[in-house]
Image (spheres, grey):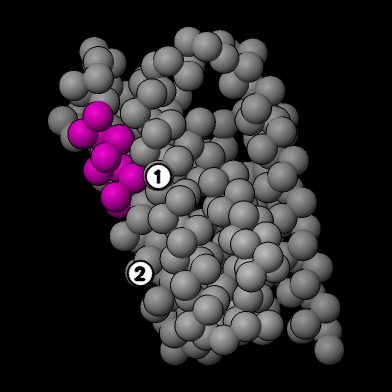
Amino acid sequence: MIELASILLHDTIALITILNPLAAAGIMISMIAGVTPAVVRPIAKKAALTVFIASLITLYSGELVFKFFGINVLSLKVIGGIFLLTIALNMASGHSSKTRQTAEEKDEATDKDDVSVVPLGIPILFGPGVIATIIVLNHNLSQDFTTMTSYGVITVSIFFSSIIVYMTLRYASAINGALGITGMKILTRIMGLIVGAIAVQFIIGGVKGLWV
């Protein structure tokens, strides 16, 4: 039980770090006019719900889709790790990752009345890095526990992560005001180091598995 609780905490932190709701909160503030609780609350709710649903779909069908196309999970570990590493390097250097939102998506978002699902939920919060992370975490867990246990643990991790996403977006203005630009950049750099460490673990684990 203690081991599962530790894994749950680890996986939840990993998901939250890769989702990076702090960065998403800053982007959200820049995309909407009149950052008031009445405006932000429904956006935060829809974005978090989008992340939750998309994550569950990935968890329960993602590995099957990759197997259908003949893609080994170990290969996904390597490419997912490389992708996460590029995100981590951007975060650690204090730059916003272009993999989260391209210039074209940013321009398109300015014309939208509702940015909660696209582009905030997908792809700013939920993107390829999150997809790879969910599948790999579930695959790793299923090596030591039953399939039902691994799905259960990752589902709870996704639920907690989605709650954190909602709370961060919901109080984005207060968090932004309290931390300031410098505080946000420091936290982003710290999260970048964590993402980088996870990415290296993915790459090494994938390469070792494929080598054998």
Q: Can residue 32 be seen in this view?
A: yes
* Residue 90 falls in image quadrant: top right
Q: How crowded is mark 1: few (under 14 residues within 10 Å), some or many (20 or more)?
A: some
Q: What residue is rendered at 68% in x and 82% in y?
A: 144
Q: Quadrant of residue 164?
A: top left
Residue at 44% x, 66% y is 155
**Dot 2 crowding, Cα within 10 Å, few <14, some 14–19, many 20+:** few
Q: Is residue 8 left or right of residue 37?
A: right
Amino acid at the residue labelled 2 = Ile
Element type at marker 2? helix
**Residue furthest toward the left?**
113
* Kind of residue at badge 1: Ile
The correct choice, above or below, for 12 with respect to 2 in the image is above
Quadrant of the snapshot with the N terminus: bottom right
The percent position of residue 27, horizontal first and vertical second, equals: 42, 27
- Spatial distance from mark 2 to mark 1, Cα to Cα? 17 Å
Q: Considering only vertical position in the picture, is 118 above or below 170?
A: below
Q: In which quarter of the image is the C terminus?
A: bottom right
Q: Nearer the viewer, residue 76 or 38?
A: 38
Q: Residue 57 carries which label?
A: 2
Q: What segment is highlighted magenta in the picture?
A: 41-50
Which one is nearer the viewer's eye here, 63 or 174? 174
